Every structure is written in C-alpha cells, then in structure tokens.
Amino acid sequence: MENRSYALMTGVFTIALLVAAVLVGLWLNRDRTEMAPYEIVTTQSIPGLNPQAAVRYRGLEVGRVEEIVFDPRVTGQILIRLSVDKDSPITTTTFASLGYQGVTGIAFIQLDDDRTGSPRLAQREDQAARIPLRPGLLDQLEKRGLAILEKTEQITNSLANMVTPENQQTIVGAFDSIGKAADAYAAIPQKLDPTLDRLPALTAKLDRSLSSFDSAAASVDRTAANYDALATRLQGPDGPLERINGAIGTVQAAANELELETLPHVVQMTDEARGALRAVKRTANSLSDRPQGILFGAPSAQPGPGEPGFVPPTK
C-alpha cells in the first residue's frame, strides 16, 4: 500500500510540475505588443489568405489576420479584420495588397504607402479604421493575361479570315507574280553583259575626252592670262585708256566753255535776227497791200472813237 501511494504521489507531482512549466513558458512567451484593429473591405478574390496569416508593412511583420468574414450589410463583400502593431506607421495613404510566400502559395497581407509624411490614420472606438485593398501582382497578371488572350484570339480570327479559299488564291497568285519578277530580275544581268563588255572602251574614250578637256582648260587659262596682261597694259598710267580718258576730259571742258560763254551770245544774236525778220515781214506785207506807199508814204491812221475826226460807220 505504501509503495502504491508513493507512486501515485510521484505521478501527481510530475504532472503538476509539467503543467506549471507549460504555464510559466506561456506566461514568459506571451505577446506584450499593443495591437490596434483595422479592417479591409474588398470584393476581390483572396485565394490562399487564411486567419492568422501575417501582416507585413514593407516586408516587416507588424500583425496578423484575425478574421475573414462576409459583410452582412453588403452582399458579396468580404471583411478582413487585422490586428496591427499600434506603433506601425499606418497613414491615410496606406494601402494593402495580397502577397504570396515563395512556391507554397500561402498568402499574407502586404501594407505599403504611396508617399511618406502622410498623416496617421485616425482610430475610432466604435469602428475599426479601414485600409483599401489594391489588386496584387497575380490579379494584375490575370487581368493582363486575359487581355492578351483576347487580343490573341482576335489575331487568330483575323488570320483565319485571311486564309480563306479566295485569299489563298490571291496569295498564291502574288507568290507566282513574285517568282516571275525574280526570273525577270535574274535575266537582267545577262542583258547587261554586252554593255559591261563595252565599258572598258567607254572608259578609255572618257579618259581621252578628259585629257582633251584638260588641254582646252590649259588653253583657256593661257588666253585668260593674255587678256589679263592686255588689260594691265590698257589700264596703265600711260596706256591708251588713260589717254582716252584725258581726251574725253578735254572735250568735256570745251563743251562746258561753249555752253557757258558762246551759247548765250548765239541765243542773243538769234533773237535779234528773229526780230529783224519780223520787221522785214511786216514791211513786205505793207508794200504788198499798198505799193504806192513807197511814193506817198504810209497812210495816216484812222481816228478811233473819241478822237477828232472819228466818223461812226453807217449800216
């Protein structure tokens, strides 16, 4: 009896010691971090995300997912409740997205911020602050993949329309035309062979023509040099051009002297001759009218109105 009671007491003591050790370990390892509740509201799919999943802010673990439920007020909307370290820099521009760990496919909440320095997100006692959820990398790849598949389908349909029997005949005809054009181009070198054979002779003629042009250019240069020498002799101090210029100056001076001194006298003599000719003309006219005037002289002038002896004319 004593052995049995001793063994029973030993077992109870051992069990009590194990329980105490577990409780002490739990107490020592309990999380003393003060957490703040946040909420994510989304209509996107969240594959791989489970309660107790990690919440990370730019790669640093700051909390965990507490609960994932459907929103009772909005059909189809999902509520994700988070517990995040109260000291985490959750601001008004902070957003969430789904991240995945390696090849396991286990999802976690990735928090990030559009810019630094934004005001902190205010907390309310009656409702948890909400953080927007943006599409993650897989969601973006899925949407872009669907768009790429849609465009690929459109291209496939376009290609299918292009290879209809009518278009096939057109394409075959185009290839036939290209083959004929290639054959025609292949025959061009054969036609050019005679011309290529004549090229050396043409080149020799061209060389001779260039030599003739060089000789003509040399002759032109010599002629130009002769003209330059002739122009130099003509334009020299005692050259013909200088003497011609002197003669022109002398003639111009004589013309100026004639214009200033002789012409006024000639003009005066011309005026006097013109007056004499007018007097002679009047005398001739008077003699023609009254030839007896040579013997009896000029008749006396008839008295005018108001003068003695004036007789008014009668009708």
Image: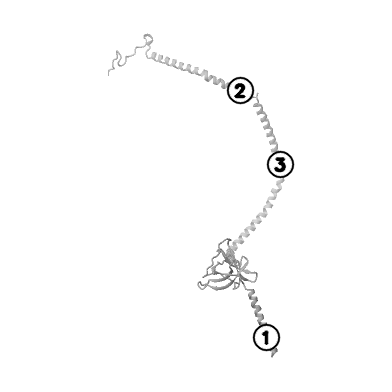
Looking at the rendered structure, the kind of residue marked 3 is Asp
Q: CA distance from mark 1 to mark 2?
A: 159 Å
Q: Quadrant of residue 65?
A: bottom right
Against 16, residue 213 (above or below) is above
Question: Badge 2 local density, few (<14 within 10 Å), some, or many (20+)?
Answer: few
What's the residue at 50%, 18% (across, down)?
264
Q: Secondary structure at mark 2?
A: helix
Dot 3, how many residues are within 10 Å of its Cα: few (below 14), some (14-19), or many (20+)?
A: few
Q: Residue furthest bottom?
A: 1
**How far apart are the two marked residues, 3 and 1, measured between alpha carbons?**
130 Å
User: In this figure, which residue is indicated by the disc labeled 3?
Assistant: 207
Residue 226 pos. (x, y %): 68, 30
Pick whichever of labels 3 and 1 is earlier in the sequence.
1
The reply to whether the C-beta atoms of the residues labelled 3 and 1 are less than 8 Å apart is no
The residue at which mark 2 appears reads as 246
Amino acid type, residue under disc 2 in the picture: Gly
Residue positioned 38% across, 14% down in the render: 286
Discs 2/3, front: 2
Residue 185 visible in this rendered orientation of the protein: yes
Q: What is the distance, in whole Å, between disc 2 and disc 3 at their CAs?
A: 53 Å
Q: Which is more toward the observer, 286 or 303?
A: 303
Q: Which residue is mark 1?
A: 9
Between 15 and 273, the one nearer to me in the picture: 15
Mark 2 or mark 3: name the one nearer the start of the chain: 3
Q: Quick check: 3 left or right of 162?
A: right
Along the polypeptide, which appears first: circle 1 or circle 2?
1
**Coordinates of residue 63 in the picture (x, y in percent):** 60, 69
